[in-house]
Image (spheres, rainbow, N blue to C red):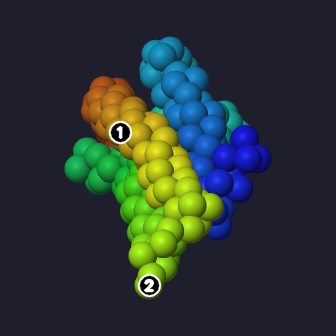
Amino acid sequence: MFSIIQAAGWPIYPLILLSIVGLALVIERSLMLRRGRVAPDKLLDEVVALTRTSLPSPDVINKLGSSSSLGGVLAAGLRAVVAEPRLGEDTLRLVFENAGRVMVHRLERYLNTLGTVATAAPLMGLFGTVVGMIEIFGSQSPTGGTNPAQLAHGISIALYNTAFGLMIAIPALMFYRFFRGRVDEYTVDMEQAAERLVPHLMRFAVRKSAAAGAGA
C-alpha cells in the first residue's frame, strides 16, 4: 500500500484525507440513523396506551422526548396539550409540524457533506490525472529523447489518482442515496404517527375545555 501511495504522488494525499472523512461520516450516520434510535416500532402504541386515560407527568414526557427522534415529536405535542388545555387542533398540528422539521434537520446532519465527498472525489482524482499528464509531457526532452523513470511516474500518478477517486466516490454516493432514502422513510413515519396522535390528544383538550365551561 505504501508503494502505491508513493507511485501515486502527492495528489493522492488529499484523496486519502477525503476518504477518511467519508468513512467517518458513513459510520456516524449508520449509528445515528438506526430505527431504534429514530423511530422505534412500538413507541407510538406505547404513547397511546400511556395516554389512554390521562396525560403523563412532565418527567415522563421529558424522558419520551430524549428517547428518540419520534419521541421528541410526540413529546412536543404532549407538552403543548399539557401547557394549553384549550389548544385547537390546527395549532396542535402546527406544533407537530415544527417539531418534525427540527428532527428531520437533525437526521439530515452531515448528509450534504457526504454528498460533497461523493462529488469532489472524482474531481480530485481528475486533478491527479492532469498532474500525471504534466509529468508525462515533461518526460519528453527537446531533443526527442524520453526519461523512462519520469514517464512511468507520470503514468502512475494519472492512473492511481483516477482509480482512487472513483473508489471513494462510488461508495460515498451509494451511502448518500441510502441515507437520504432512510431519512425520507423516517419523515413519513413521524408524519403518520403525529397524524394518528392528534385526535387522541384532542380528546383531553375538549374534556378540559368542557370542564372549565361547566365550572363557569
Badge 2 or badge 1: first in the primary sequence: 2
Residue at image coords 68%, 36%: 63
Q: Are marks 2 and 1 in contact (CB under 8 Å)?
A: no
Q: Secondary structure at mark 2?
A: loop
Amino acid type at image mark 1: Arg
Q: Is residue 169 left or right of residue 64?
A: left
x and y percentages locating residue 184 in the rendered image: 32, 37
x and y percentages locating residue 201 in the rendered image: 38, 33
x and y percentages locating residue 112 in the rendered image: 43, 57
Name the residue carrying label 1: 177
Q: Is residue 152 above or below residue 60?
A: below
Residue at image coords 53%, 35%: 33
Query: Callout 2 environment at 10 Å: few (<14), some (14 to 19), or many (20+)?
Result: few
Q: Nearer the viewer, residue 43 or 198?
A: 43
Q: Is residue 94 above or below residue 53?
A: below
Q: Is residue 142 above or below residue 186?
A: below
Q: Nearer the viewer, residue 136 or 11?
A: 136
The residue positioned farthest toward the bottom in the image shown: 142
Amino acid type at image mark 2: Pro
Residue 85 visible somewhere in the drawing = no
Q: Nearer the viewer, residue 151 or 56?
A: 151
The residue positioned farthest toward the left in the image shown: 90
Q: Secondary structure at mark 1?
A: helix
Residue at image coords 48%, 16%: 41
x and y percentages locating residue 128 in the rendered image: 49, 64
Q: Looking at the rendering, in which quadrant would you find the N terminus?
A: top right
Residue 37 visible somewhere in the drawing = yes
Residue at image coords 49%, 28%: 39
Name the residue carrying label 2: 142
Using the numbered discs, state the Cα–Cα distance from disc 2 to disc 1 in whole angstroms: 50 Å
